[in-house]
């Protein structure tokens, strides 16, 4: 069983739709990162959170430590949001990031 | 700040050759990570340094891989001898506080071993 499960693996949406990407993990963590990787390959850190919710522009990330679950939401999606979104919990014990396999999002105009 | 700088961006080499990838972390960051990304395995941690000291190299595939961080502003990842299965994108990332600080990634070095 993978330590990090993301769903869906692929997601296609129309511009303007509300997007939710889910991440479940089985390891004990002290923080969780959401990363964005564009088709060009570069990786950008969107959020690092250890509890509650964070918002940045149209992006919102939430985490429930007890349920070992995090979600990334995109409001009013736009074609430029098309990318792979990667959930990466940070294991406090081993001090390692564990990576999900990513969710490929395509937003059509 | 220029961000995390990696070189080369692309490298094509023949099996058996030595490959050296370089990374300059963001000034002031005390943690540096080397990751490898392939289609099959996704992102994997190879090694990370804290205050220039290797903390965990359990992700280094085998003895052909080695990494150094001689000072706070420079790190290398070396593969000797290289093999076709080493073909991947290698990312360097830095942060101020291991995994609980925001991570900044370099643009990656795409390695192709023929």
Image: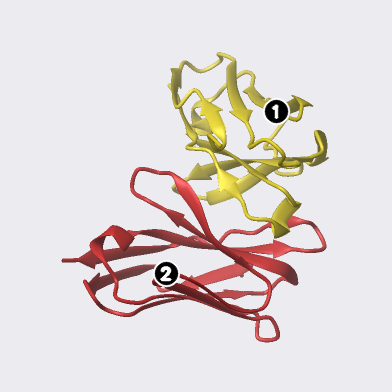
Farthest-out residue, bottom: A67
Residue with the mark numbered 1: B73
Identify the image's colour scheme: rainbow, by chain, secondary structure or one colour.
by chain
Mark 2 chain: A
Left or right, A82 with respect to B1, comes to: left
The part of the image, by quadrant, that contains residue B6 is top right
For this orientation, the residue located farthest to the front is: B1
Kindly indicate which chain is depicted in red in the rendered structure.
A
Q: Which mark is residue A57?
A: 2
- Which residue occupies the foreground of this view, A93 or B95? B95
Q: Position of residue A75 (x, y in %)?
A: 35, 77
Image quarter of the N terminus of chain A:
bottom right
Residue B105 x/y as whole percent: 55, 44
| Residue at image location 71% in from the left, 59% down from the top | B100
> Is A44 situated left or right of A52 in this image?
left
SS category of the residue bearing label 2: loop
């Amino acid at each position: 069983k993978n330590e990090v499960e993301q769903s869906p693996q692929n997601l296609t949406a129309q511009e303007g739709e509300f997007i939710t990407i889910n991440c479940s993990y089985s390891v004990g963590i002290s923080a969780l990162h959401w990363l964005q990787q564009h088709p060009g390959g570069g990786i950008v850190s969107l959020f690092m959170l250890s509890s509650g919710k964070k918002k940045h522009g149209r992006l919102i990330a939430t985490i429930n430590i007890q349920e070992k679950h995090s979600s990334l939401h995109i409001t009013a999606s736009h074609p430029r949001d098309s990318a792979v979104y990667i959930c990466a919990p940070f294991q406090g014990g081993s001090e390692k990031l564990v990576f999900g396999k990513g969710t490929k999002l395509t937003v059509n105009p | 700040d220029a961000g995390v700088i990696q070189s080369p961006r692309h490298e094509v080499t023949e099996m058996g050759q030595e490959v050296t990838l370089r990374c300059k972390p963001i000034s002031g960051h005390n943690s540096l990570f080397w990751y490898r990304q392939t289609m099959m395995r996704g992102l994997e941690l190879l090694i990370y340094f804290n205050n220039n000291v290797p903390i965990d190299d359990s992700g280094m595939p085998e003895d052909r891989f080695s990494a150094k961080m001689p000072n706070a502003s420079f790190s290398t990842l070396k593969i000797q001898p290289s093999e076709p299965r080493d073909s991947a994108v290698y990312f360097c990332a830095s942060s101020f506080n291991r995994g609980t600080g925001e991570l900044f990634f370099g643009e990656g070095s795409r390695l192709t071993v023929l």
